[in-house]
Image: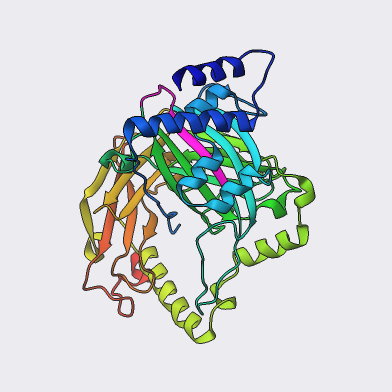
Amino acid sequence: MDDKLDKMLKHALTPTDEPDFWLNQNILNQAKEREAMEKGTGKKMRRIPAAALAAALVVGCGSVTAFAAWKYLTPQTVAEEFGETKIAEAFTNGDAVMVNETQSYGGYDVTLMGLASGKELSVYSHFDDNGCKLELDKTYSVVAIRKSDHTPMPDTSDDAYSDYSFFVSPLIEGYNPGLYNAFTMNGGYQEFSEQGVIYRIAECDNVEMFADHKLYLCVSEGSFYDNGAYLFDEATGEIKRNEDYSGLNALFDLPIDPKKADPETAKAYMENLWKDDEEQEDTGKKEDAKQKEDATDRWIDRLTAENIDQHATRIEESVQVCTPDSQGYISYHYTEKGEMEFQGKLSVKDIFSGEQRFMVVGCSGSEDDLEGLRIETVALNDDGTVTYAVYAPKQTESIDDIRFVPDEEKNK
């Protein structure tokens, strides 16, 4: 089998004969067959839901070479690993878009292998609050991520795997990517590691309706969209990579046929995406939820460097003293008991303006009450470093009975 495989590779890599998708698939199947005989079936992978849910550019347009097929799984095979038979079929029968473009930034090689869009492509069912099955219309993007120095990425079963997180999302020309991305467009993902490469199927609501706009796919480090990694021109609507950004900030063009655009549906979708919960929930429930959310917001808004220790307890293992990098950014990462993950990258200049030296930069957990709520804070130190810390509300606090210094006294 080795001799036959070598002959196929030699023939496929000759300058006069460019291999097509099916030749790549045959090579890959034979390679996997040999590997299975040698190693058995000890594959390990983990299915992961969404959160709340950089130097050279290497482009391989058209069909991927046989050498690339030898090193990477195909989109069809990646889908099959998760039992996503309909997504795999889309790549098999030509209903999907093959891209096979690689970009290298921040020490990673990221390959956008392809994407498939359509209704009911996933084998997983979703239901509304009344138990009725939802007919999902989604876009699925298949990407491969590896280290540029070819050291292997950890397997999903390794402890080191939790040290790596990536944000993969379509972006739409003309729409602020900080507001319109996979996080807000009902995104999620599945991924696994194979021979040092992480393969991910990232999903979100079908973006084909926006095909009359330029469409992108961003891949960056972290669990959320990083405003520092990309630039949005409000005047033109263009989205670009931040060339001064030192980390991973790949940005691919999505080659979706403009004829698939549906401007009316897209307009209605965007109008509903940020509708207030009041317009979408039962009147009785929404009023109670709104009051609790408002109370929580007021509680957080009143926290200051002087009173936060009175109302919340600092989680000491979260404390990090961060030194700004050459671009003036600080980075932080903290995981609480392997469940809640906090990480981000912030511009010190943008956060601390004027005499401001303390700020709440985020919160996670329940909005119904203070139990389980976590507050992320940053404080500017005299030496220019920034102290990042996560706080938990004290159990004695209550949303309905908050004891703060009155605003008029605090402002004196």
- At x 54%, y 79%, the residue is 281
Look at the image and say whether residue 150 sits in the magenta stretch.
Answer: yes
Color scheme of the displayed model: rainbow
Q: Is residue 246 visible?
A: no
Q: Main secondary structure of the magenta part?
A: strand
- At x 54%, y 36%, the residue is 74
Look at the image and say whether residue 306 sits in the magenta stretch.
Answer: no
Residue 50, picture quadrant: bottom left
- At x 64%, y 51%, the residue is 117
Question: Which x, y percent locates residue 302?
Answer: 36, 65
Question: Which x, y percent locates residue 125?
Answer: 51, 65
Toward the viewer: 133 or 349?
Answer: 133
Q: 353 above or below 209? A: above
Residue 156, picture quadrant: top left
Q: Is residue 351 left or right of residue 9?
A: left
Question: Which x, y percent locates residue 6?
Answer: 50, 17
Q: 78 above or below 359? A: above
Toward the viewer: 185 or 365?
Answer: 185
Q: 243 above or below 304? A: above
- At x 39%, y 38%, the residue is 193
Q: Which residue of the protein is positioned furthest toward the right in this rendering? A: 259
Toward the viewer: 126 or 209?
Answer: 126
Q: 69 above or below 277? A: above
Which range of residues does the magenta coloring cover? 140-151
